[in-house]
Amino acid sequence: MVPLLTTSGRKLMRKLLIALACTLLTSGAAATETWDMATPYPDFEFHTRNIRQFAQDVSDLSGKKLEIKVHSGQSLIRHPEIKNAIRGRQIPVGEFLMARLANEHPIYELDALPFFASSYSEALALWEAQRDFVQQHLGKQGLRVLFAVPWPPQGLFTKQEVTEVDQLKGLRFRTYNTVTERMARQIGMVPTQTEATEMATAFITGRIDAMMTSPSGGAKNKAWDWSTHFYHVQAWLPKNLIVVNQRVFDGLDKDVQEAVMQAAAKAEKRGWEMSEIDTKEGVDLLVQGGMKGITPSAELVKGFKEVGKTLTDEWLQNAGEEGKAVVDAYEKKLTGNGAQ
């Protein structure tokens, strides 16, 4: 016969059960880790939408062992500070424009070099050639590349028909960094520093006569209200990097690490597809808005390619042997992939 518990025994049993329940609840809570992720872009940008899907995929693939809270629109950390915030473990993961690191090493600037890789197939070949070098340099700072996604290719907006590069000489051209300034001077245009928020006003007031931005960027700013011609020259496709702190990543369980990398691979593939869709939709909107031009002449493309070669040669002088190795690897990728 099983002896009945005394009143004090029952109280002790209740305490033990409560303690056990608390332990189980605490263990369950500890199994879920939450990361804050910073991105400088607003929610409507396809990059941010892709990031949010990445966060959802991480949650699903990890069995909710890791949750990522996305902070968009520079709401958590300003764009220029995101990389160092990840490095200093203020946040474990974030997104930023790779070309912003050009002052650290020329290799980060290559995808923003005009007319070097000027189509999606070329941009992908460049990333395949460039990725290990980028990881090597960021790895020295305790960072790990998860994936990269390009912005739509940059196109030429003007207030006049342009069929060859020489017709751009003397025009006031919007510049916003050293690369665009070098390109403007190489062509014979007048570099005019102009922020993205000032594009329309600068065109209307005559402060600039030409600029380069993506088709979707032009469409969002209703370029047909202040310019007349758009040429889809695909000058360059700059990439965003999504980077994690290596120590924080190493602290995850192996299965969670695998979940993060699987989600990253999906996000990279999806992001490139979203970028191409964004480009097509942007071009379609420009056509609907009444923009002329669209397909550049063979002579204009040839002239821009010559400008690109000069800028690439200048870049190679600064990038040294490592830069040459990346360019060589890229050219081999082009030959192997048949990129156009």
Image (cartoon, rainbow, N blue to C red):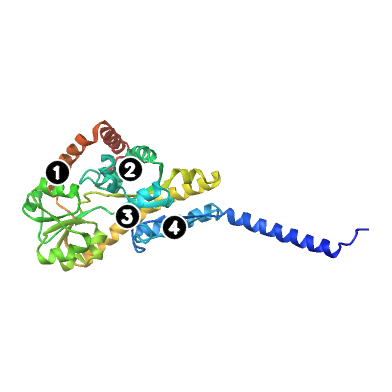
Q: Residues within 10 Å of mark 4 (few under 14, many from 20)?
A: some
Q: CA distance from mark 2 to mark 3?
A: 22 Å
- Point out which mark residue 53 bears: 4
**SS at mark 2 in the image:** helix
Instruction: Please state the total of marks drawn on the protein image.
Output: 4
Query: Label 2 amino acid?
Result: Trp
Q: CA distance from mark 2 to mark 1?
A: 22 Å
Residue contact at pointers 2 and 3, CB within 8 angstroms = no
Residue contact at pointers 2 and 1, CB within 8 angstroms = no
Which percent across, then down, holds residue 339?
28, 42
Which percent across, then down, holds residue 34?
50, 55
Query: Label 1 amino acid?
Result: Val
Which percent across, then down, holds residue 122?
28, 44
Q: Earlier in the sequence, mark 2 or mark 3?
A: 3
Query: Label 3 amino acid?
Result: His
Which of the two marks, 4 or 3, is nearer to us in this view?
3
Read off the residue under disc 3. Answer: 79
